[in-house]
Image: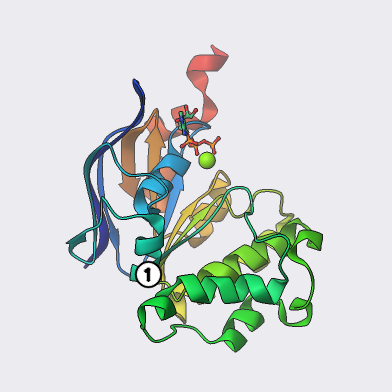
Amino acid sequence: MSHMSLENVTMKFGPFRALTDVSFHIDRGEILGVAGPNGAGKSTLMNVCTGGLRASEGKVIFDGKTITPFSRHVRCGLGIAQTFQVPTLLSSLTVGENLLAGALFGREARGAPPGISLDEILSLTKLGDLLEMEAARADLLTRKRIMLGAALATGPEMIFMDEPLGGLNAEEIADFLDVVRHVRDTLGITVVMVEHKTRALAEIADRILIINFGEFVMLDTPEIVLNDDHVVEIYLGKKHDA
Ligand SMILES: Nc1ncnc2c1ncn2[C@@H]1O[C@H](COP(=O)(O)OP(=O)(O)OP(=O)(O)O)[C@@H](O)[C@H]1O
Ligand SMILES: [Mg+2]
């Protein structure tokens, strides 16, 4: 069953269309990869789903309900969480306070039972020994872990991750992909992950969505998508090299 659907979504910034007439379904419990060249509209697409942006036209449907006009805060309460391309933290607070803030803004704020225990979040993110540390002092990988922990602390049903692997080495990427698998397999959370690293996406995603110039190109299994001539051309940028 579809967990979220976009119906004919267009996102305009003044006269510029960052997304044009995009429609697709996200299945409950899947790991959906999203890829496309720089500036294709991937972050815009995430924000339209999570409430950072309101679609100019079209509908966003979550669990059968139209959520298009809702703010990020309201969508977070419904169970939609996001991590960002550039880690955003409450820098002057401790790691533990960042996780607590996630819990406060999430489902608990609406009286829903917490979805994930703090122990589980700490074991997944390996933040157990760092709870008292000021978040501003964290290195990149730790900042990413804090952001993921805070997003999980909201008790989400869906989590959107914007280029979570940027700046990580091969070992860190493998570790992170294990965490993502756990989030989906054990916690049952639907995962949508924007990522440039198509090899990592192929490894983890059930399906991959390709967008280019704000338009839907293709949505299918990694094998089909990454072997598609048009997709390969978009990635190799043949037109630009010629
Ligand atoms: N707030 C905004 N105002 C005006 N234009 C914007 C805004 N946000 C994004 N854009 C434009 O929309 C297009 C899509 O941007 P977006 O950040 O969604 O791309 P992306 O696929 O995430 O790129 P990247 O791979 O570099 O992260 C770009 O041309 C960008 O300049
Ligand atoms: Mg982006």
Mark 1, Cα crowd under 10 Å, few <14 / some 14-19 / many 20+, is many
Q: Residue at x 35, y 52 (%)?
A: 49
The front one of 222 and 81 is 81
- Its colouring scheme is rainbow
| 189 with respect to 129 (left or right) | left
Residue 30 seen: yes
Q: Amino acid at mark 1?
A: Gly
Residue at mark 1: C-beta within 8 A of ligand 1: no
Image quadrant where residue 119 sits: bottom right
Q: Residue at x 42, y 40 (%)?
A: 44
The residue tagged 1 is 77
Looking at the picture, how far across and down is residue 140, in whole percent?
A: 74, 56
Looking at the picture, how far across and down is residue 57, in whole percent?
A: 22, 37
Looking at the picture, how far across and down is residue 26, in whole percent?
A: 30, 58
Image quadrant where residue 189 sits: bottom left
Q: Residue at x 57, y 15 (%)?
A: 241
Up-down relation of residue 87 to residue 98 (above or below): above
Residue 31 seen: no
| 235 with respect to 21 (left or right) | right
The front one of 156 and 189 is 156
How many marks the image carries: the answer is 1
Image quadrant holding the N terminus, namely: bottom left
Q: In terms of secondary structure, where does tag 1 sit? A: helix
Looking at the picture, how far across and down is residue 219, in whole percent?
A: 32, 47
Residue, far top? 242
Up-down relation of residue 240 to residue 231 (above or below): above
The front one of 100 and 122 is 100
Q: Residue at x 63, y 48 (%)?
A: 86
The front one of 184 and 101 is 101
